[in-house]
Image (cartoon, rainbow, N blue to C red):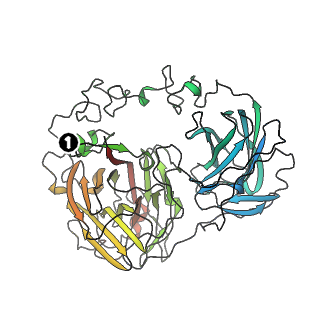
Amino acid sequence: MRTPSKFLTALTVSSLLAACGGASSTSPEPSPATSPSPAVEPLPSSSPSSLPSISPSAVPSVSASVSPSPASSDNPNGNFVIQAEDYTATQGDVDTESADGGTVVNFFNSGDVLEFNVNIELAGLYEVTYRVSSPASDAVAELFVTNQAGDGVEHVDTSVVSTGDWAVFEDVVAGQHFNIWSAGPNTIQLRGSGTSDYQFNTNYLSFRRIGDIDVDVDSDADGVPDHTDECPETSLDDEVNSVGCALSQLDGDNDGISNDVDQCPASTEGVNVDANGCEFSGGVIDVNTANPALPSFTTFLDTTPAGKQWQKVEAMSDEFDTWDAAKWFKSTWNYGDTPVKMMHSNSGVTDGYLWIKATLNAGSTQWFETSRVHSRAKILFPMYTESRIQVANISAYSTYWLNNGDANNRDEIDIIEINPTPTCDCQPNYPWQMNSQYFIVKNGDIERAHGNSNNNDLSGANALKGQRWNEDYHVFGAWWKDKNTVQFYLNGEPVNSVTTTQDFTLEQEIIWDLWTQDSTWVGGLPAQDDLLNEANSTMKVDWVRTWQLVDE
C-alpha cells in the first residue's frame, strides 16, 4: 500500500442533505505494494502502516491531534453527515480518489480504521447509513462511538457492506440502532473487519437521529441493556447473569481460569494452577495443561520477579477462532536470493488455528508461494510471548519472531526458525533443534548471536521431550527481560538465552512466516513435489499469548 500524502483536517459536520453522493463512477481496485528485498540475511522492511501503541481497548487506539470543529447551527433534527476524506486520524495506509460524485477513501483494508472527532448537536438514538462500494462478499464495516462514560469508544454496529463491484456505490443502512450519549465532542471510528484483505471504498457516513436516548438498547442481544451490562460483548449462545456476564466471562476465585471450565472454583489466591484451575503439585511438565491466563512456565516453575505480575496484552494475543483484522495483517515483501513469493491468499484462520501454507507455482523462479502474518500492535520489554505451533513438514523455516519493522534500524528476536526435514544432509540435529537468535542492524553495523536449544535436552519430566517438531504441536516462548537480555522457552521450560552488546530498545511486532532458501544454514530447498501435499506444507498456529510485566 502506498502512504497517503495527506494532512490531518478537523471534521466539519454538515446537516444531512438529499444531494449527498451522486452518480456512481469507477474507483480503482487496490493492490498491495512490494517492499524492496533485504541486502543481508532475510529481514523485514518497513511495515505497511503506522502501527498503534499497545492499548487495553478492544479497538486499536488511533491518536488525533486536531480539535473537533463546531457542528452546523441550522440543523434542528440532529442529523449529520461525515465525509470519509475528512478523517481526523487513520490506522492503515489509505488514499482518496474522485468517485461517486465526490471524494472517496479507498485502499481501505481489513483492520484499517478511520477516526473522526466531531461536535454532536443532539444526543439521542441514531441510525447510520454507509455509502460504500465493494465486490467482497465479506466486506464488513464496524462502527464505534464514544461510550456513556466518555472515556473511550464502544462497538455499536457490524454491517455487511458488499455492493458487488468497486464501481457500484450504494447506501447500506445499518440494522442496529445506537445511542450517542452526549452532545458536544465525540469520537466516531469506522473499521474494516472482514477477512478479505481489500474491504470497501467509502464516500460518507450519514447519521439520522430517530429519537431520544434509549436506555433499553442491547447491543449484544443478551437481554441486559447496555447501560447496566458489565460484559458488553457476550456471545449470542451464552446464558448471562443479571449484569450481562456469562460464566466464560467470570473468574470467581481470580486464578485466571474462567468459571465455565474451572474444576477447582475455590483455589487459594496466589497458588499456581493448571488449565483446569487446580493447583499444580509437581510431577509431569505438560505444557498443554498450563494455566492459559499466565505464561506457561509460571505453572511449573514460577520465576516472576517479586512485586511484579503478568498483564495480558490482548492486542497481541489470539486463540484464532476467527481472523481478527484489528490485530493482524499480511505483508508481501519478499526475501532476497530465494524462490519465495509472499501472497495474501496463502494464510488464514480455519478450524481454530492460523495457517500458513506453501504451494507450488511450477515453472516460475518464485515457485515457493507462501505467506507472512504480522501483529498490528508493538511492544517493549519487559514482556513475554509464546505460541503453540506445529511446523510445516518440509525443508523450510517455520518462523515465529519479533521485529520493529525497519530494515535499516533493526532490532529482531528470532524465537524459532525451524526446519524439521532438511534436504541438505548437513543438519542432522534440525528435527529437534530450536534455532533462536537476536539480530541488530544499526547504521550498517550488524550484531547477532544464537541461543539455539535442543528438544532432547528438556528435563525428563517434560511430556514433549524428544518429540520431533513435525510430529506434534510445541509451545515456543521468549521473555524479553531488559535492553540486553532475552530468555527463550520451550514447552514450559527455560532453555537457552542471548545477551546483546548494543542496547535492544525498539518496539517489536509479532511475525510468523514460512520460507526457504538454497543454503546449508536453512537446510536446503524442499522438493517441489513436496508442496503438492498441503497437509505437510502447512504451518499451524493454535494460539499466541503475550503479556507485559508490570508492578503489582
Viewer-closest of 486 and 525: 486
**Residue 534 screen position, x and y as percent:** 42, 58
In which quadrant of the rendered view does residue 146 lie? Answer: top right
Say if 444 sits above or below 429 in the image.
below
Viewer-closest of 470 and 494: 494
In which quadrant of the rendered view does residue 31 lie? Answer: bottom right
**Residue 340 screen position, x and y as percent:** 45, 71
Of the 4 image quadrants, the one containing the C terminus is top left
- Answer yes or no: is residue 431 visible: no
Residue at 80%, 45% in the rendered image: 72
**Residue at the spot of label 1:** 300
**Residue 505 screen position, x and y as percent:** 35, 63
Does 493 sit left or right of 551 as displayed? left
Residue at 30%, 62% in the rendered image: 483
Viewer-closest of 144 and 396: 144
- Answer yes or no: is residue 443 visible: yes
> Helix, strand, or loop for circle 1?
helix
Disc 1 crowd, CA 10 A, few/some/many (<14, 14-19, 20+): many
